[in-house]
């Protein structure tokens, strides 16, 4: 979905939902938006975010990672304003996070010695019930599969939902990943809050949720 970050949801650009949810959070020292799109930059500024530059061309390719983009922004911010305890990555495609969830994530970060905190949701389809196709036949994807096991007897499994990544600058620069060996889970409490909008269908589903609400 091209330029999805400024698609309208509930009458306002998608990115505004994410900017708005952290405005007023006492621990947030700056809301910094990294983009290579001048129109997105204008929308983000109008919503109250800081957009001090457009992202360099080297970070605007299909090969650039979220880690590369985050470190670029972090390096600039710390050179201008001094060291921070953590970098919170909030993707604009998760519009329904609540201030309460943001606060829970920040508190987990403090309580667990500034170890990475990752937003997760329970999986809808358990991986122990998955297949692969081999020689035109279905084969359990996992050797130790769960076929024949009741769903309530399977160990709960979670997936990163893209809604919350909080990490210390040291860990981000050293390991160059948001998901560390000792990541703390921030479990999202509703399907809507964990929604990650990447397609028109998901945007339509979000509009229907707002209408119903």
Image (cartoon, helix red, strand yellow):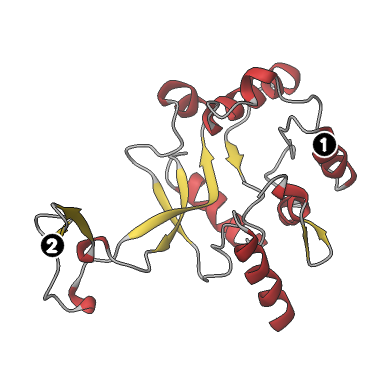
Please name the residue shown 60% across and 57% down the image.
Answer: 199
- Mark 2 and mark 1 in contact (Cβ < 8 Å)? no
Secondary structure at badge 1 equals helix
Secondary structure at badge 2 equals loop
Please name the residue shown 78% across and 49% down the image.
Answer: 6
Q: Position of residue 105 (x, y in %)?
A: 53, 53
Q: Position of residue 52 (x, y in %)?
A: 81, 26
Residue 213 left/right relative to 45: left
Q: Position of residue 137 (x, y in %)?
A: 14, 60
- In the rendered structure, which disc, 1 or 2, sits on the residue that comes first in sequence? 1
Which of 39 and 78 lies nearest the eye of the viewer?
A: 39
Q: Is residue 57 above or below residue 36?
A: above
Residue 145 is tagged as 2
Tag 1 residue: 41
Alpha carbon of mark 1 to alpha carbon of mark 2: how far?
48 Å
Q: Residues within 10 Å of mark 1 (few under 14, many from 20)?
A: many
Q: Give residue 209's quadrant in the image.
A: bottom right
Q: Is residue 211 above or below residue 189?
A: below
Please name the residue shown 74% across and 29% down the image.
Answer: 36
């Amino acid at each position: 979905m091209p330029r999805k970050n400024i698609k309208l949801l509930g009458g306002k650009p998608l990115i505004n939902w994410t900017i708005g949810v952290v405005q007023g959070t006492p621990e947030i020292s700056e809301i910094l938006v990294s983009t290579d799109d001048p129109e997105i930059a204008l929308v983000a500024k109008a919503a109250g975010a800081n957009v001090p530059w457009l992202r360099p061309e080297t970070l605007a390719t299909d090969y650039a990672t979220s880690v590369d983009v985050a470190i670029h922004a972090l390096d600039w911010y710390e050179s201008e304003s001094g060291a921070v305890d953590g970098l919170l990555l909030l993707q604009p495609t998760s519009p329904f996070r609540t201030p309460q969830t943001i606060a829970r994530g920040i508190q987990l970060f403090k309580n667990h010695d500034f170890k990475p905190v990752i937003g997760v949701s329970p999986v809808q389809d358990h991986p122990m019930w998955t297949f692969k196709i081999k020689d035109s036949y279905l084969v359990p994807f996992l050797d130790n599969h769960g076929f024949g096991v009741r769903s309530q007897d399977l160990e709960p499994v979670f997936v990163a939902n893209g809604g919350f990544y909080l990490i210390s600058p040291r860990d981000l620069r050293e390991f160059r990943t948001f998901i560390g060996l000792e990541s703390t889970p921030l479990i999202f409490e509703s399907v809507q809050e964990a929604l990650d909008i990447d397609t028109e269908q998901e945007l339509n589903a979000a509009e229907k949720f707002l209408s119903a609400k």
